């Protein structure tokens, strides 16, 4: 009788018993989406509160470090969190990152001076580094790549909601409850994610066979920190050719060269070089860097153009990004569904790079006469391109490595996109500023050059105080600056297309719901 009811090894029944129930996966994914919301919302909510924070705490000269400390800590800790998850288990690493993020949020809300706030923001950033990596790696372990596309639209949707709603929420909280609530708002969201993940996420515990690669982690941290500081300070705090910038570049190069040699000998390397032997993984890292370069550059300059040239308020300029963000969300959902049903994905990096390039070329044509409808259409094209790339790059990167390297693959892909965004904002920003200053000097003479000698970006209040002639010159200058930035972005999109052409469409692990399982 026993043989009559025995389950054959590899049978459909046995696979069903081993796989997590779909309902449990959905509950876990919901909790993970809350964590993504935490990571994405933070800077979006804090930005509108900055003027009030300075008014309360003082320290205007250190204001940029409120953002820089968070960004540096996030970037530097990202690969370490990925490796910790691979070695000791993803659940424990993820829960720890949430706790650190919440501690940093609570302390930031309690800060009594700018120095404390900067330090507490760094603690927040340490936790944030593990949030995105943890989400990606946990989904990578729970859901086979073939079925993972179903959740891509959800992640992109959460990101879009954060980008649209973050500034509105931040402004509202600051106006009605005070700037400290821009940090306290993280606490209830984080507690919900913490308890949900603790209750419903069940992953096997791991016992590391080696020690953490502390030397590699230190060298990588120094290298990342150096280059993020170069992109943050270059052209603003210090001239690009200054001794400080050159020293940071030299330190960063030396640290990364040392990191390369350490990784070849370490028993448990923090970023195993073997993952780059996969052509697809390396190409996805390149595409992720380039898409981050373009996306965050566009997110910076589109609101600036809308405020300076189209007369939008700071709040409305955020809402006017909706064509791009909604297109990105819709296309990401379609791409995920198509990937799940067909198992094909090479089309999306190619189509995404093409659409991204076309959108940037169109945006580069905007001038002082471009209507909001026209610019909205152009933004939708760009958003559609980014929607094809946002999650597909992570999916293919994860599919290109073994399960034991899921964490470092996720963290490496995330790190390259983060570095791309830093370089994009810096390089496009330098190009924009130089073009604006040249145009102002040409169109408005010495008065125009004086207006923008401190910064090429004027807020609405400053713009309203300018004489009509100077204001008109500034609007033309901003149009010229955004043209230059978007032309550079289109070159990056072309480079992404060249990389996408060489992607190999290797089968995704796992099977679609209705298909037989791979052997």
Image (spheres, rainbow, N blue to C red):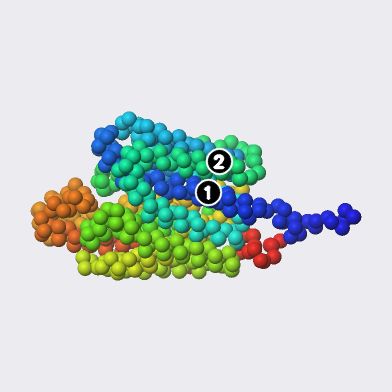
Residue 222 falls in which quadrant of the image?
top left
Q: Residue at x 31, y 62 (%)?
A: 486
Q: Position of residue 394 (x, y in %)?
A: 51, 56
269 to 29, vertically: above or below: above
Q: Secondary structure at mark 2?
A: helix
Q: Residue furthest top?
A: 112
Q: Position of residue 391 (x, y in %)?
A: 49, 58
Where does label 2 land, which residue? Answer: 195
Which residue is at 23% across, 54% downward? 433
> Which SS class for mark 1?
helix
Residue 177 located left or right of residue 461: right
Q: Residues within 10 Å of mark 1 (few under 14, many from 20)?
A: many
Q: Which residue is mark 1?
A: 32
Quarter containing the C terminus: bottom right
Quadrant for residue 493, please give it. Answer: bottom left
Task: Please state the horizontal and vertical placement of residue 392, each as a whole percent of the image.
Answer: 50, 60
**Near-viewer residue (358 or 377):** 377
Residue at x-position 47% and y-position 49% = 36
Q: Earlier in the sequence, mark 1 or mark 2?
A: 1
Residue 367, quarter of the rendered image: bottom left
């Amino acid at each position: 009788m026993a043989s009559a009811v025995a389950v054959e090894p590899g049978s459909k029944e046995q696979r069903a018993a081993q796989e997590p129930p779909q309902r449990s996966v959905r509950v876990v994914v919901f909790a993970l989406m809350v964590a993504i919301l935490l990571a994405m919302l933070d800077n979006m909510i804090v930005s509108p509160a900055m003027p009030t924070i300075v008014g309360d705490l003082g320290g205007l000269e250190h204001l940029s470090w409120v953002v820089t400390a968070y960004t540096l800590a996030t970037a530097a800790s990202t690969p370490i969190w990925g490796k910790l998850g691979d070695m000791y288990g993803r659940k424990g690493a993820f829960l720890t990152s949430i706790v650190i993020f919440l501690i940093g949020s609570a302390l930031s809300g309690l800060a009594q001076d700018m120095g404390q706030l900067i330090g507490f923001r760094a603690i927040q950033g340490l936790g944030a580094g593990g949030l995105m990596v943890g989400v990606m790696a946990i989904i990578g372990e729970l859901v086979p790549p073939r079925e993972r596309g179903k959740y891509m639209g959800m992640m992109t949707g959460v990101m879009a909601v954060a980008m649209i709603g973050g500034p509105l929420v931040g402004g509202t909280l600051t106006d009605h409850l005070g700037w400290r609530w821009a940090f306290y708002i993280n606490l209830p969201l984080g507690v919900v994610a913490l308890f949900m993940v603790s209750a419903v996420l069940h992953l096997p515990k791991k016992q590391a066979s080696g020690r953490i690669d502390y030397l590699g982690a230190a060298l990588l941290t120094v290298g990342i920190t150096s280059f993020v500081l170069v992109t943050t300070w270059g052209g603003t705090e210090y001239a690009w050719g200054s001794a400080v910038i050159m020293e940071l570049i030299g330190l960063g190069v030396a640290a990364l060269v040392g990191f390369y040699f350490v990784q070849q000998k370490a028993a448990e390397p923090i970023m195993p070089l073997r993952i780059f032997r996969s052509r697809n993984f390396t190409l996805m890292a390149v595409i992720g860097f380039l898409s981050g370069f373009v996306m965050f550059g566009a997110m910076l300059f589109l609101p600036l153009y809308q405020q300076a040239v189209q007369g939008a308020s700071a709040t409305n300029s955020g809402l006017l990004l909706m064509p791009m963000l909604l297109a990105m969300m819709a296309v990401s959902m379609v791409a995920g569904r198509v990937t799940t049903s067909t198992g094909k994905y090479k089309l999306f990096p190619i189509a995404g790079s093409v659409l991204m390039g076309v959108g940037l070329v169109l945006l580069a044509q905007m001038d002082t006469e471009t209507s909001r409808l026209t610019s909205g259409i152009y933004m939708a094209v760009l958003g559609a391109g980014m929607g094809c790339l946002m999650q597909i790059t992570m999916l293919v990167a994860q599919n290109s490595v073994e399960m034991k390297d899921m964490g470092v693959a996720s963290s490496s892909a995330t790190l390259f996109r983060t570095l791309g965004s830093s370089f994009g904002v810096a390089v496009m920003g330098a190009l924009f500023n130089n073009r604006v200053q040249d145009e102002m000097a040409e169109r408005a003479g010495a008065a125009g050059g004086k207006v923008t000698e401190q910064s090429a970006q004027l807020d609405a209040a400053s713009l309203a105080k300018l004489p009509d002639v100077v204001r008109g010159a500034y609007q033309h200058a901003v149009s010229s600056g955004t043209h230059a930035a978007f032309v550079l972005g289109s070159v990056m999109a072309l480079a992404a297309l060249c990389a996408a052409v060489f992607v190999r469409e290797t089968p995704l692990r796992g099977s679609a719901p209705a298909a037989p399982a791979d052997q």
